[in-house]
Amino acid sequence: MSERLQKVMSNCGVASRRAAEEMIAAGRVRVNGVVIKTPGVKVNPEKDIVVVDGKRLEKPVKQYYLFNKPKGVITTVKDERDRTTVMDYFCKVKGRIYPVGRLDQNTEGLLLMTNDGELANILMHPGRLVDKTYAVRVKGRVSDVILKKLADGIPLDDGMTAPAVVTYNGFDDKTGITEMEITIHEGRNRQVRRMFEYFGFRVHNLRRTQYAFLTLNGVKRGAYRRLTREEIRGLYKYKQEQP
């Protein structure tokens, strides 16, 4: 099956698609002995010989990890300000992997890491409706009326949020903290925080506890584990859901 050259390079762990496009434009890539300078050219990774900087691309072994991201860690491959990123926890992993989606710096919890570009694109597609559950702790008491509005949808700057599942877990009189769980399937930037900020609440702590059917059970903060074959097959089932 033919694919865009930059996608093949990304899937082989050379670089991100954007960086791969720059490498192609710079004349650093040959396909079957011919220098290619036009991103978007399609190649067959099973038949065509792709050489980058004099080295032939080899199909990488696909890797899949479930990571419990600590608070304060940046969800990116590189950071210009030299802050701690999720990649600092995967120094012993050979080959290029990257996060599926992102958690903001102050959000902790479940994050998938892989080098399987196809699965990453499946899971991040807005039409796949992959559930993500968060444990939320906010300062102040959250009323039943607000809980219902959170569940029904909030008019944010980038549009109305889709219906969510909200579970109230209690209010602590001593700390003034309300604890809840919220399940969404959208992937907007800082969505859960913005939903509570809409009502004037400051999120005290936010942790993703579940992604699809995957949970943090047995994975300590800052640790990771490989996904099982059954889990990988389960995630690929989202491909069958047409957007």
Image: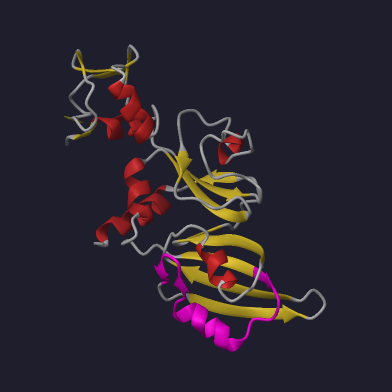
Where is residue 175 shown, x and y percent of the image? Answer: 79, 73
Q: Which residues are magenta?
A: 137-161
Asked if residue 180 is positioned above or below residue 123 in the image, the reply reads below
Q: Nearer the viewer, residue 34 or 190?
A: 190
Q: Nearer the viewer, residue 158 or 70?
A: 158
Is residue 194 left or right of 201 when viewed as pictured?
left
Where is residue 114 shown, x and y percent of the image? Answer: 44, 41
Q: Nearer the viewer, residue 18 or 7?
A: 18
Spot the residue most to the bottom: 145
Residue at x-position 31% and y-position 62%: 127
Residue at x-position 36% and y-position 34%: 18
Q: Quadrant of the C terminus?
A: bottom left
Residue at x-position 54% and y-position 45%: 75
State the scheme by which the image is colored: secondary structure
Is residue 160 left or right of 45 when viewed as pictured?
right
Specify the quadrant of the image occupied by residue 208: bottom right
Spot the residue most to the right: 174
Q: Quadrant of the N terminus?
A: top left
Where is residue 147 shown, x and y percent of the image? Answer: 55, 82
Specify the quadrant of the image occupied by residue 37: top left
Question: Would you say residue 195 is visible in this rendering?
Answer: yes
Q: Is residue 140 magenta?
A: yes
Q: Is residue 39 magenta?
A: no
Asked if residue 198 is positioned above or below residue 114 in the image, the reply reads below
Spot the residue most to the front: 157
